[in-house]
């Protein structure tokens, strides 16, 4: 329901994992999901490449 680029955008834009979850669930339901949306989002301390 949400393409990979949009998922990446949401994850990079949000400061907190719970905000990412809320945004992604909203996008999934807006994209046509009816029920049973499952997400796992975790914060990582691994540095991202530049």
Image (spheres, helix red, strand yellow):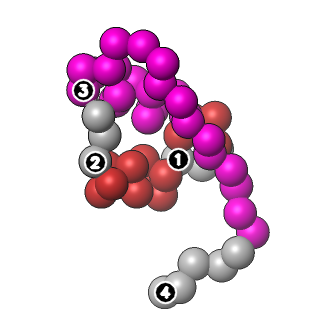
Highlighted range, magenta: 21-45
Residue extending farthest left: 31
Between disc 3 and disc 1, whose residue precedes? 1
Foreground: disc 3 or disc 1: 3
Residue at figure coordinates x 32%, y 20% from the top left: 33
- Residue behind mark 3: 31
Between disc 1 and disc 2, whose residue precedes? 2
Residue at figure coordinates x 42%, y 13% from the top left: 35
- Label 2: element kind: loop
- Residue behind mark 1: 14
Q: Position of residue 40 (x, y in %)?
A: 62, 41
- Label 3: element kind: loop
Q: Position of residue 18 (x, y in %)?
A: 63, 35
Foreground: disc 4 or disc 2: 2
Between disc 3 and disc 2, whose residue precedes? 2
- Residue behind mark 2: 3
Q: Are marks 4 and 1 in contact (CB under 8 Å)?
A: no
Q: Position of residue 42 (x, y in %)?
A: 68, 50
Quadrant of res 46: bottom right
Q: Is residue 9 left or right of residue 30?
A: right
- Residue behind mark 4: 50
Check disc 2: other Cα within 10 Å, few if <14, some if 14-19, many if 20+.
Answer: few
Q: Are marks 1 and 2 in contact (CB under 8 Å)?
A: no
Check disc 4: other Cα within 10 Å, few if <14, some if 14-19, many if 20+.
Answer: few
Residue extending farthest top: 34
Between disc 4 and disc 1, whose residue precedes? 1
Please tell me whether residue 22 is drawn above or below residue 47 in the rendered image: above
Q: Main secondary structure of the magenta part?
A: loop
Between disc 4 and disc 2, whose residue precedes? 2
- Label 1: element kind: loop
Q: CA distance from mark 4 to mark 2?
A: 23 Å
**Of 12 and 28, the residue lying toward us:** 28
């Amino acid at each position: 329901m949400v393409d990979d680029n949009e998922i990446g955008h949401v994850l990079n834009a949000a400061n907190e994992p719970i905000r990412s979850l809320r945004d992604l669930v909203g996008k999934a339901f807006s994209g046509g999901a009816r029920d049973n949306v499952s997400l796992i989002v975790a914060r990582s301390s691994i540095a991202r490449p530049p």
